[in-house]
């Protein structure tokens, strides 16, 4: 029993979904995603009990590419996030008439497959392939099922694709170069390399472009808001919930260990850039009139903080980043789902057209409220745990980083509560707003449950990822 | 036989045929009548043939002359095809000025 | 050798078949024949290299595997012909026969041992292409294409011939072996290198590299679509293969100036090809420009000749197969529309999902997106070039891959986001089969590069 | 056993919260009120038992549940600690909490969302207990932000009114500013001490087991104090508290007078050993406290909204407490917290009872003469007013007097400021009393008809609190102070006991006289001249500045909020456009080049051949050059 089975399940799921036809597609997709989640849980359980669940077979002789899937706490955590969010995201699309449903859900499953592959790959080229593969489904999802005016959407989506593709090509060059050095793409072969300063710098730089665009770190973020706004909510969830985590994961897994020297040398500028993103995103979020755009910018801010945590190269920073990734994944999906629900009722994401919803929907209000609070990292929610560790790591690096990064808890509260007030509170809205159905509520309950549980008891995840992260930190510190 | 080559010297043959080649090339460049362009191309090819023959004598090696036959045959075939196309064009446009062939561009 | 003879024979059989009114049989027979020859050819793989007619023809794995690729491509082209030429069935034998002769020329181009053979091969290829290009006598643009191709082609032949003559003059032989030895012996007159360069230029013309590319877009656009397919896949690949073999055969070590020229030309080709393609509204023309840029990519193999043979073949195969698949779709969409403007593809995703998917895949492959062989082709190429230490050109190539996404996706967008204007009609069986098989081969190559890389 | 009881103490209100949230809609208003009250009452009972136990054994009860967070150099556990300090706090949190719950049953009776109200109140109590019970800074932080949340929910309880929502938002965000300071403080503490547990920190300090950089320690103390400022409404973060009066009156009484706002004092007292090591920070605290008390009191002089006056008096009283803290007299601060909790809660509830009678009218200019109709309210109100004005023998007198006395001994200017502040307090409190209860009714006839004494559920808590306000001083009489004895274990350095000498009595006398002066002035103005505050438009001069709270809010808006928005629009309209413009520009450039290239591809064979030849020539030339 090894991790391969997860990927196989997802791939079969994608195919099955497509061939199940429009009627059944959603259910089949749900089933397979749940199956994948179960398997991931089981495999993680095995792994934590010391069973070897990794998988390595030779694939291509020349060049030497291995079908190598490493399954340590870190990658499995990310896969858990992916496969846990997948059913939630699919559930969130229920009750919404989907044209070409089979392709829609098929693509979602394909994307989940690709992303899981990215997290699991232990071979550089395999990783790159999954990385690129994950781009194609979201491109079509955003393109075909997206909202907004068609031409503008097309422009933004293509921009997004070319932009991210451009970034990853530089990463490819870096990989090819590394391959020329080692004659293999295996992660641990890369780690054994002894690259000189310039090599490390350029490799770090190539990786950085790829990741900075994907995360996104300012000033590479311009694709984000528009795509988040125009993509169908499911697509936005996939993007913000999982896809951008790929980049941060990759920083931890590939960029830092392979090229630690520049990471140390340019630590301050890097962190400064990320934190600039935090403030920039928060302030921009204040000015948004579109709910999804606001959430996009808030996500920009949060992710900036996570990235900053990673680049501190401290165990707290990395651990906090991982926890924060998982937490943010759930929160952002929940928030976009709330936006989606409002959009279903009011056919708009314009904040100005909302307000006075709370009167009509006590249940939805409280759920939305909890999510808002989680996203501003109220203690005892999962986000707080991550944010605390990240900020603590920043404080260790330089207290001012913590202060500046910490403004997120002020500005975050500012724009989130402002949004909540404008969207939910005030005199009863003239348009009727039906309270959440059971299905919709169920999704929220799942998400909130996760957030609160791990907010109070993050130990399982912490123990799961800590050894890996400690090794990485060790490698970084010991290398040259 | 060789005395001729000695008298003239291989270089001059090269210069001559290069000159001829260039003449042909400029013919192709400056003439707009398709037939004339064909002829210029023929000049180019024949310049090459001359060169080949000269070299084959120079090297005391028949291969060059054999090659000339190849190239002549090929040239003939080419021109045949070319003329056929030309005829088709004439049927459609009633002229063979290649400047009238500017439909495809951009 | 047998391959070459068999192919020529097959061509003649087609012509004879016409005489005996076996028109129906022509295409099946030739396809079966081609497959048989392919089998034969593959069985001969890994045999020791052999020479015929005192080195007129030299067979080795290089020639064999490239011949195999040519045969595969031709098979597809032949399979496409009957549907394409259904309006004038009487000519089918000619079309098929010419294609087969063209193939013979191509095979000769990769299995020559003597410049004469090489010259013959390239001429056979070119002349057949002239004919095919102008094969719609009533259609002015076809005439124009034919004329342009012919004039410039024969001009290029002249240049090649001049180059050959100079080489002969410098070395006193047409035999590649001998030339090679003479050159490595040293003390060769200066014009030898001029000869090489002229030869190079002639071939750069054939593969449509900048600045010798101007004919390509016009000719591609003007010629009948099937001919365009032939040119952009078979002809280009063959020329590239011959080019590579020739250069490996003649230069015992590549001089620096030569490398610089190649780098400049390839960079120019990539940029011009991609930038021009951005603004094209005609698919054939667009593919012509993309072909130019791919020529630029392929030229990079000359930067480390000893190791890039396999890479070149892989790239050629990936490109050829993707091209065939793409053109099969183009034919099926624009077959009876008279033009190949992009708007014909609007809403293809709805009307013919399969065709749309195939075209998407082939475009993604050309753009170099993973799991399609196009990606691995680029990837191997970059690897080798980086090893040769040419980082700059790799960066240029990367930038160009980014640009290329722009126009490849223009087509994809048209297929999936715009709405079809006219009602859907059935896709001819032949087209869909060819398209699917080609793209499947392409993907198979992507998943298992060992399939072909093993032989080189 | 202790663990179970402690958990019961902690979770009883939470259970009440859950019941009210999930079944509230079905329950009748009274029932959910009773549930809410019962929940808090249970906590109070448990607290009482613990209180007795601990005050006899002098042994703190420790409860360690499980590990929460794990960081590089310390872990954080869910662990609780019931020692003298936390129990004292719990006593009046749960005690007064219970009373206010009782009060609310009647006060909120007609509100459609009464179950929500009690849910939130219970949640607040729950978080407040967490804040007090935690045995490390992070647990305190949970409670800290939790109570902030509840105050947000309760201030914005009438969410249909966007002004109230603004007030709620303002409160939350201003608290958050403080919280950031608190967090930074926690980081530094954790970094220095490798732990966040109070006990560990104390041991490190007392044993000096490893060196602590004093500068960083001071910075930490300062950051923590910023946190306290946010929560306890000190300069510069006090402006949210007056606005917070938008919430229902019981909320103002419980959260914004008695309990939550004293969290800052609790935190500093908790970490007294840390602050003792940072004397310069202590000075800052003292000064900030004193100034706050003066400013707030001065603003309070001219306010006409009955709750606003009380709010500013709260701010000013909190200022006095911080003054005490700054002087290192932690017990005294605590003492004043307790007495203040009694009389201020009583005052707020009293004002609530008045507002209840006036059907929501809060402007004192339309009140008056209520003492005839509202006997109980009046008497309790009077007692508390005397208490806050610092007249013996009421509770306020002792605590305030202690503070001033300490100030006098340490720092005369501060003593002056404090005394002035308390004179003002006496003045505006009696102004409030006179305007509300004396003379004739100034409201509408309509209101006059409905004037009535509030029902028993409202008056009962008033009476209890009034009694406490009257006798509460007994817990720490000058000379022999039970409180100081009781708190001795948790406070390392004790405020030196001034033996009651002549100076002390003199000071007492001064304080009393001061209070009497204030009262006298109020009497002269509002009884003798029976003046009524002018309408807003007529207010002029310095009074206008005071009435508009020194325009602090406006200044903040101009200096902070506006710039942020401006920056936002700048980013949105300039940088965003510029960046994406640049990215798009590259694409455009490519397109332009393509378009230009098309002209080159002009279809003329002649030109093509020319280019061809040109190519040949250039290559040949290059070769010759390269040779």
Image (cartoon, coloured by chain):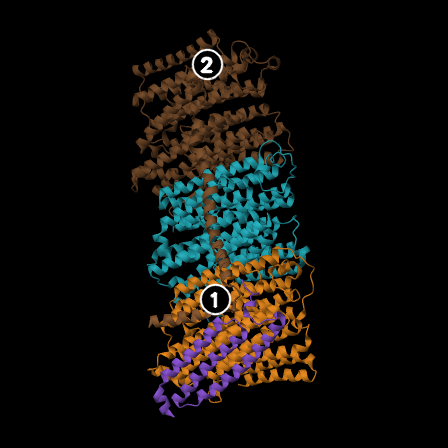
Chain colours: A cyan, B purple, C orange, D brown
Residue D264 is situated, as x and y percent measured from the top left of the image, at 42, 31
Asked if C71 appears above or below C362 in the picture, the reply is below
| Chain at numbered mark 2 | D
Q: Mark yes or no: residue D99 visible.
A: yes
Q: Which mark is residue D430?
A: 2
Marks 1 and 2 share the same chain: no
Residue C113 is situated, as x and y percent measured from the top left of the image, at 46, 84
Assign a secondary structure to mark 2: helix
Quarter of image, res C414: bottom right
Q: Which mark is residue D472?
A: none
Q: Nearer the viewer, residue D76 or D419?
A: D419
Local crowd at mark 2 within 10 Å, few (<14), some, or many (≥20)? Answer: many
**Residue at mark 1:** C378
Q: Is residue C58 left or right of residue C343?
A: left
For marks 1 and 2, give the one nearer the viewer: 1
Residue under the image location 55 percent in, 47 percent down: A229
Q: Nearer the viewer, residue A334 or B13?
A: B13
Asked if D396 appears above or below A168 in the picture, the reply is above
Q: CA distance from mark 1 to mark 2?
A: 88 Å
């Amino acid at each position: 029993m090894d991790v391969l089975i997860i990927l196989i399940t997802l791939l079969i799921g994608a195919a099955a979904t497509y061939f199940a036809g429009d009627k059944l597609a959603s259910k089949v997709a749900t089933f397979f995603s749940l199956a994948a989640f179960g398997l991931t849980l089981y495999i993680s359980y095995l792994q934590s009990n010391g069973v070897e669940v990794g998988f390595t077979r030779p694939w291509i002789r020349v060049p030497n590419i291995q079908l190598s899937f490493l399954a340590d706490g870190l990658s499995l955590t990310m896969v858990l996030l992916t496969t846990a969010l997948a059913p939630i995201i699919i559930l969130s699309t229920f009750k919404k008439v989907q044209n070409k449903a089979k392709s829609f859900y098929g693509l979602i499953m394909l994307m989940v497959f690709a992303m899981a592959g990215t997290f699991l790959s232990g071979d550089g080229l395999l990783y790159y392939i999954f990385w690129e593969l994950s781009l194609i489904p979201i491109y079509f999802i955003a393109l075909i099922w997206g909202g907004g005016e068609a031409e503008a959407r097309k422009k933004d989506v293509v921009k997004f694709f070319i932009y991210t593709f451009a970034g990853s090509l530089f990463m490819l060059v870096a990989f090819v170069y590394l391959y020329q050095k080692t004659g293999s793409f295996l992660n641990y072969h890369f780690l054994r390399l002894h690259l000189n300063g310039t090599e490390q710098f350029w490799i770090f730089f190539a990786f950085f472009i790829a990741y900075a665009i994907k995360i996104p770190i300012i000033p590479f973020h311009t694709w984000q808001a528009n795509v988040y706004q125009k993509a169908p909510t499911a697509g936005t969830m996939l993007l913000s919930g999982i896809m951008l985590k790929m980049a941060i994961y990759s920083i931890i897994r590939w960029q830092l260990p392979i090229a630690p020297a520049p990471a140390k040398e340019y630590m301050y500028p890097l962190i400064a850039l990320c934190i600039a993103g935090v403030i920039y995103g928060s302030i921009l979020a204040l000015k948004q009139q579109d709910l999804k755009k606001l959430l996009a910018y808030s996500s920009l801010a949060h992710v900036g903080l996570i990235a900053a945590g990673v680049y501190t190269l401290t165990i707290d920073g990395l651990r906090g980043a991982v926890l924060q990734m998982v937490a943010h994944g759930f929160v952002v999906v929940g928030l976009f789902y709330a936006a989606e629900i409002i959009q279903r009722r009011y056919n708009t994401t314009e904040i100005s057209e909302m307000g006075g919803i709370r009167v009509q929907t006590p249940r939805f209000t409280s759920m939305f409220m909890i999510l808002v609070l989680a996203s501003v990292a109220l203690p005892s929610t999962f986000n707080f745990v991550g944010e605390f560790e990240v900020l603590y790591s920043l404080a260790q690096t330089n207290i001012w980083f913590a202060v500046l990064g910490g403004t997120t808890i002020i500005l975050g509260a500012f724009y989130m509560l402002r949004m909540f007030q404008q969207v939910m509170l005030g005199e009863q809205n003239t348009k009727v707003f039906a309270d959440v159905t059971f299905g919709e509520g169920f999704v929220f309950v799942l998400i909130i449950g996760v957030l609160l549980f791990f907010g109070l008891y993050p130990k399982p995840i912490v123990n799961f990822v800590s050894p890996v992260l400690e090794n990485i930190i060790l490698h970084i510190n010991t290398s040259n | 036989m060789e005395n001729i080559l000695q008298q003239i010297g291989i270089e001059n043959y090269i210069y001559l045929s290069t000159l001829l080649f260039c003449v042909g090339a400029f013919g192709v460049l400056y003439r707009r009548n398709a037939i004339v362009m064909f002829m210029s191309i023929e000049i180019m090819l024949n310049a090459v043939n001359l060169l080949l023959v000269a070299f084959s004598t120079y090297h005391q090696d028949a291969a060059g002359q054999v090659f000339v036959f190849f190239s002549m045959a090929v040239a003939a075939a080419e021109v045949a095809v070319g003329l056929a196309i030309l005829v088709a064009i004439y049927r459609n446009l009633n002229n063979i000025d290649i400047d009238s062939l500017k439909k495809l561009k951009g | 050798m047998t391959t070459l003879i068999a192919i020529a024979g097959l061509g003649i059989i087609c012509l004879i078949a016409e005489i005996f009114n076996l028109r129906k049989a022509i295409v099946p027979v030739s396809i079966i024949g081609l497959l048989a020859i392919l089998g034969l050819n593959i069985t001969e793989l890994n045999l020791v290299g052999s020479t015929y007619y005192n080195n007129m023809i030299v067979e080795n794995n290089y020639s064999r595997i490239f011949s195999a690729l040519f045969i595969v491509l031709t098979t597809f082209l032949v399979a496409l012909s009957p549907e394409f030429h259904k309006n004038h069935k009487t000519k089918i034998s000619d079309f098929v026969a010419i294609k087969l002769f063209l193939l013979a020329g191509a095979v000769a181009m990769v299995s020559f041992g003597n410049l004469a053979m090489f010259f013959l091969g390239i001429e056979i290829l070119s002349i057949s292409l002239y004919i095919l290009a102008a094969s719609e006598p009533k259609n002015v643009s076809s005439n124009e294409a034919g004329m342009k191709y012919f004039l410039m082609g024969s001009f290029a032949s002249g240049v090649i011939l001049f180059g050959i003559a100079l080489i002969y003059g410098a070395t006193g032989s047409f035999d590649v072996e001998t030339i090679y030895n003479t050159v490595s012996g040293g003390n060769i007159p200066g014009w030898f290198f001029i000869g090489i360069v002229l030869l190079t230029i002639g071939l750069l013309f054939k593969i449509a590299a900048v600045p010798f590319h101007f004919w390509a877009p016009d000719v591609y656009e003007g010629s009948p679509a099937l001919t365009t397919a032939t040119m952009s896949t078979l002809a280009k690949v063959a020329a590239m293969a011959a080019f590579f073999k020739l250069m490996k055969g003649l230069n015992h070590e590549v001089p620096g100036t030569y490398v610089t020229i190649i780098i400049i030309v390839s960079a120019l080709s990539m940029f011009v090809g991609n930038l021009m393609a951005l603004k094209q509204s005609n698919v054939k023309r667009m593919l012509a420009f993309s072909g130019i840029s791919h020529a630029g990519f392929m030229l990079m193999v000359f930067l480390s000749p000893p190791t890039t043979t396999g890479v070149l073949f892989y790239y050629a195969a990936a490109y050829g197969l993707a091209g065939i698949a793409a053109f099969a779709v183009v034919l099926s969409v624009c077959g009876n529309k008279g033009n190949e403007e992009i708007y014909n593809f609007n809403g293809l995703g709805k009307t013919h999902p399969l065709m749309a998917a195939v075209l998407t895949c082939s475009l993604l492959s050309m753009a170099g997106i993973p799991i399609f062989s196009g990606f691995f082709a680029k990837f191997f190429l970059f690897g080798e070039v980086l090893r040769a230490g040419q980082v700059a050109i790799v960066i240029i190539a990367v930038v160009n891959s980014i640009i290329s996404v722009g126009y490849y996706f223009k087509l994809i967008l048209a297929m999936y986001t715009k709405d079809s204007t006219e009602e859907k009609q059935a896709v001819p069986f032949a087209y869909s089969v060819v398209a699917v098989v080609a793209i499947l081969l392409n993907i198979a190559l992507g998943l298992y590069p060992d399939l072909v890389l093993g032989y080189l | 056993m202790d663990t179970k009881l402690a958990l019961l103490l902690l979770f009883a209100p939470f259970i009440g919260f859950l019941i009210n949230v999930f079944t509230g809609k079905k329950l009748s208003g009274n029932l959910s009120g009773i549930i809410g009250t019962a929940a808090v009452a249970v906590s109070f009972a448990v607290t009482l038992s613990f209180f007795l136990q601990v005050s006899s054994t002098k042994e703190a009860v420790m409860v360690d549940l499980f590990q929460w967070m794990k960081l590089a150099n310390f872990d954080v556990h869910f662990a609780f600690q019931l020692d003298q300090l936390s129990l004292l706090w719990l006593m009046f949190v749960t005690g007064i909490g219970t009373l206010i719950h009782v009060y609310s049953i009647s006060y909120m009776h007609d509100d459609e969302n009464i179950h929500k109200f009690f849910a939130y109140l219970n949640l607040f109590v729950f978080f407040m207990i967490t804040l007090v019970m935690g045995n490390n800074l992070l647990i305190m932080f949970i409670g800290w932000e939790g109570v902030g949340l509840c105050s947000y929910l309760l201030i914005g309880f009438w969410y249909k009114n966007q002004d109230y929502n603004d007030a709620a938002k303002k409160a939350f965000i201003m608290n958050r500013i403080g919280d950031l300071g608190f967090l930074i403080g926690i980081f530094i503490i954790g970094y220095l001490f490798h732990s966040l547990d109070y006990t560990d920190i104390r041991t490190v300090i007392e044993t000096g087991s490893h060196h602590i950089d004093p500068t960083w320690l001071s910075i930490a103390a300062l950051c923590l104090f910023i946190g306290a400022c946010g929560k306890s409404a000190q300069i510069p973060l006090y402006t949210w508290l007056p606005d917070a009066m938008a919430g229902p009156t019981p909320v103002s009484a419980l959260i914004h007078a008695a309990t939550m706002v004293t969290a800052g004092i609790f935190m500093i007292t908790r970490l007294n050993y840390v602050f003792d090591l940072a004397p310069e920070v202590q000075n800052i605290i003292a000064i900030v406290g004193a100034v706050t008390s003066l400013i707030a009191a001065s603003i309070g002089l001219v306010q006409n909204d009955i709750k606003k006056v009380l709010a500013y008096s709260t701010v000013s009283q909190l200022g006095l407490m911080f003054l005490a803290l700054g002087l290192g007299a932690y017990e005294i601060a605590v003492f004043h917290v307790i007495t203040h909790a009694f009389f201020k809660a009583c005052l707020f509830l009293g004002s609530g009872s008045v507002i209840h009678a006036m059907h929501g009218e809060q402007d004192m200019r339309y009140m008056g003469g209520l003492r005839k109709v509202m006997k109980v309210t009046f008497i309790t109100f009077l007692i508390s007013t005397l208490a806050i004005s610092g007249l013996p023998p009421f509770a306020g007198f002792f605590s305030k007097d202690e503070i001033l006395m300490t100030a006098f001994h340490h720092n005369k200017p501060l003593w002056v400021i404090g005394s002035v502040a308390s004179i003002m307090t006496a003045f505006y409190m009696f102004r409030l009393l006179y305007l509300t209860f004396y003379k004739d009714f100034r409201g509408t006839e309509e209101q006059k008809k409905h004037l009535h004494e509030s029902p028993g559920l409202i008056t009962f808590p008033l009476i209890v609190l009034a009694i406490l306000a009257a006798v509460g001083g007994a817990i720490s009489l000058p000379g022999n102070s039970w409180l100081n004895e009781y708190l001795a274990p948790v406070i390392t350095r004790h405020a030196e006991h001034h033996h009651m000498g002549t100076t002390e009595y003199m000071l007492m006398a001064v304080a009393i006289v001061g209070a009497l002066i204030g009262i006298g002035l109020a009497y002269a103005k509002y009884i003798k001249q029976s003046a009524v505050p002018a309408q807003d438009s007529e207010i002029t001069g310095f009074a206008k500045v005071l009435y508009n709270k020194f325009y602090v809010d406006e200044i903040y808006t101009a200096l902070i909020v506006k710039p942020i928005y401006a920056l936002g629009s700048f980013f949105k309209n300039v940088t965003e456009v510029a960046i994406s413009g640049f990215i798009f520009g590259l694409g455009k450039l490519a397109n332009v080049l393509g378009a230009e290239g098309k002209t080159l591809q002009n279809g003329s064979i002649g030109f093509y051949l020319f280019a061809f030849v040109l190519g040949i020539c250039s290559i040949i030339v290059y070769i010759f050059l390269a040779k």
